[in-house]
Amino acid sequence: MTTAREEDLILCNATLVGGAMEISAEQVKQIVNATARAGFSGVSLWAFHHLAAVGAGMSDAEVQALHTDAGLSVPVVEALIGWETGDEATIDAQCTSTLDIAQRYGARTVAGVVMGPSLESFDATVAGFAYLGKLAADRGLNVCVEWLPWSGLPDIASAWKLVQDSGLANAGLVVDTWHWLRQPGGPDLDTLKQVPGDRIHVVQLDDAKVEPQGDDIMAETMGARLLPGDGDVDYAELFAALDEIGADPVWAPEVFNTELMALGPDEMARRIGTATRKVLGL
């Protein structure tokens, strides 16, 4: 049985707009309010959305107030990108604003990903992640990495090696259950059980079938994820492993699904919340 608590259940509410990075200030308000009405305690905030609202004329304080006035915390901010080459000038240019937004909101951790299909050098990626960790620590933040099955960091084994090799005390992992099921070789309990529980910063909940639904994995992951419990993820097995290592993460459903999105942000958020609470036993 998981140790999930309602106060640790937040929503990756970028899903309510299909993962669009350029959205209006009004859309930001809509997804924030839909999140609150669905009973979530907070959001995993896309920094792009904060910046989009500011670009539309709101102040930083006004965007933040949308969340605080709705009673929502922001424990997680996404996503650090462009750091895997290890070039510090590039990291400063591409990642500093995301880290600053996370600091503004009082987030616990900032999530990073590798978007490209391969790494030029694993050692350079380690160096880049270590530099990210230092920038995060300077702001009182943790940094966590999410593996993507189609990327140069495709599985939990490679992501955990990155964290270990970085030598960072403030680094951890994002476990997305879609990526957990679809990583090369499938679920890897052996590696997960080697990870200290406090290194699991976030668990993103969603679902999928074992067999890909079509030939385009990106189209499926961004538009056809299933609600938690509607696919083949073995949640009982995964939760037992997380309990075994003493994990106590933030729980953040991330269900990109165009059919659900067509129902509108309130109904989509409500359905995600209902399914997630059922899986978590809340």
Image (tube, rainbow, N blue to C red):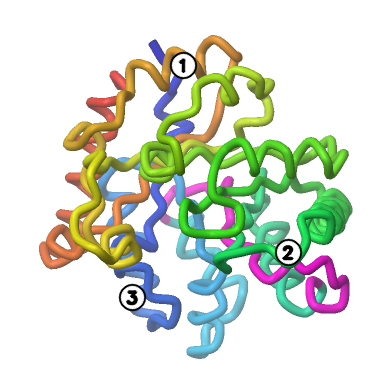
Q: Is residue 231 left or right of residue 166?
A: left
Q: Nearer the viewer, mark 3 or mark 2?
A: 2
As shown in the figure, which amino acid type bears the numbered disc 1? Thr
As displayed, is residue 264 above or below residue 275?
Answer: below
Q: Position of residue 185 (x, y in %)?
A: 44, 36
Residue stretch rendered in magenta on the structure: 70-91
Report which residue position mark 2 lands on: 84
Q: Position of residue 205 (x, y in %)?
A: 37, 39
Report which residue position mark 1 lands on: 3
Report which residue position mark 3 lands on: 27
What crowding class fits label 3: few (fewer than 14 Cα within 10 Å), some (14-19), or many (20 or more)? some
Q: Position of residue 208 (x, y in %)?
A: 25, 43
As shown in the figure, which amino acid type bears the numbered disc 3? Gln
Q: Is residue 78 magenta?
A: yes
Which residue does the image show at 36% across and 44% down from the upper left? 178
Q: Earlier in the sequence, mark 3 or mark 1?
A: 1
Q: Nearer the viewer, mark 1 or mark 2?
A: 2
